[in-house]
Amino acid sequence: MTETKIGAKIIDGKGFAAKLRARVTTETARLKTDHGIVPGLAAVLVGKDLASQVYVRNKNKQTVDAGMNSLGETLPVDTSGKDLLAEIDKLNTDPAVHGILVQLPLPDQIDPHAVIDAINPAKDVDGFHLRNVGLLATRRGGMVPCTPLGCLMMLEDRLGDLTGLNAVIVGRSNIVGKPMAQLLLSANCTVTIAHSRTADLPAICQSADILVAAVGRPQMIKGDWIKPGATVIDVGINRVPAAEEGKTRLVGDVAFDEAIDIAGAITPVPGGVGPMTIACLLRNTLIAACQQNDIDVPDI
Ligand code: NDP
């Protein structure tokens, strides 16, 4: 296949995210000028997990670049659940904090559900609180989880109206798979959720006009599992050994080199879903800041 044809098939998440961040930056500046409000996003990290540190550092930089305040703390790895809840309580009542993100996974001594339940739902910019989960499931608004929201935006940008399309989501996590299913259902897709106990996964995948892979297994989804022309969104981020001795590289859950010949369009890893997640986090923080101050939410 020629370079141009390949380029046309790749969904440029990095470029899409840059455009979304630019819109968020413009609206953030407007909020400051018109109302004197600077959105504040607090990230709480417990311990020193390397991948989490990288994510939080990226997020901090992009928050500041968008004109927002980047707040929050890194707590020691042996922090108790009680102490973390006290920190959340402090952020819940701090008027300078409009969005709270608790970086997952948390160390074993902390119950993640108790922590998520403790976040003020209005500040839950990750959309994981039970209230926001319920609002999404009943199509009543609320904060939408960032990764699936970014996937939906890219799908609608590529395909327009999704009505009637068969969507298969591989993965049923609370963070990606399930909210992705809710969003695609609301967009009038016919939705199938597959998981580790699904029988004949290749055949299920072959029925998909839209295939979302959120598994966490490197290149598990093969080219011949993909329906010709399907739109493939690869959420997976897996680190594998690179050709060069001692080095690693990132790959998705889809065998990209096989899929590119068959899919109609596909997100690359890296440069696909990942950048959209942080862009959507900034979008949600801006919306949260508007809502908490009874200001009309911009259309972004
Ligand atoms: P989880 O581990 O929480 O969920 C994985 C899901 O995949 C589970 O539902 C599991 O099924 C399913 N699964 C595992 N093995 C198989 C298999 N052999 N066949 C079919 N299904 C299988 O992961 P997350 O949802 O949190 O993340 C998924 C991937 O997305 C990871 O690579 C993660 O790093 C990445 N990610 C990327 C983000 C981004 O911004 N790009 C953000 C969040 C995640 P079961 O329920 O039966 O166990």
Image: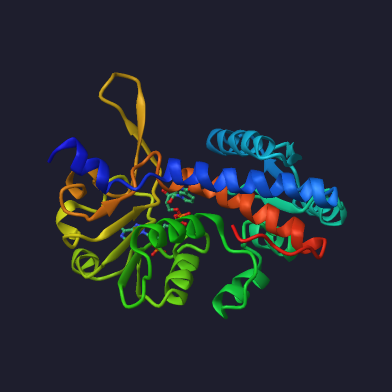
Question: Where's residue 24, x and y in %?
Answer: 63, 48
Any part of residue 82 in sight: yes
Residue at 84% over, 52% down: 35
Q: Is residue 300 left or right of residue 173?
A: right
Residue at 48% over, 55% down: 150
Q: Looking at the rendering, in which quadrant would you find the C terminus?
A: bottom right
Question: Where's residue 219, x and y in %?
Answer: 27, 46
Question: Where's residue 8, x and y in %?
Answer: 26, 46
The image shows residue 160, relative to residue 264, as above or below, that is: below
The image shows residue 72, relative to residue 163, as above or below, that is: above
Depth check, front residue: 15 or 175 = 15
Q: Is residue 60 left or right of residue 219?
A: right
Q: Quadrant of ligand 1?
A: bottom left
Q: Looking at the rendering, in which quadrant would you find the N terminus?
A: top left
Question: Where's residue 273, x and y in %?
Answer: 43, 48
| Residue 144, quarter of the rendered image | bottom right
Q: Residue furthest top?
A: 245
Depth check, front residue: 212 or 79 = 212
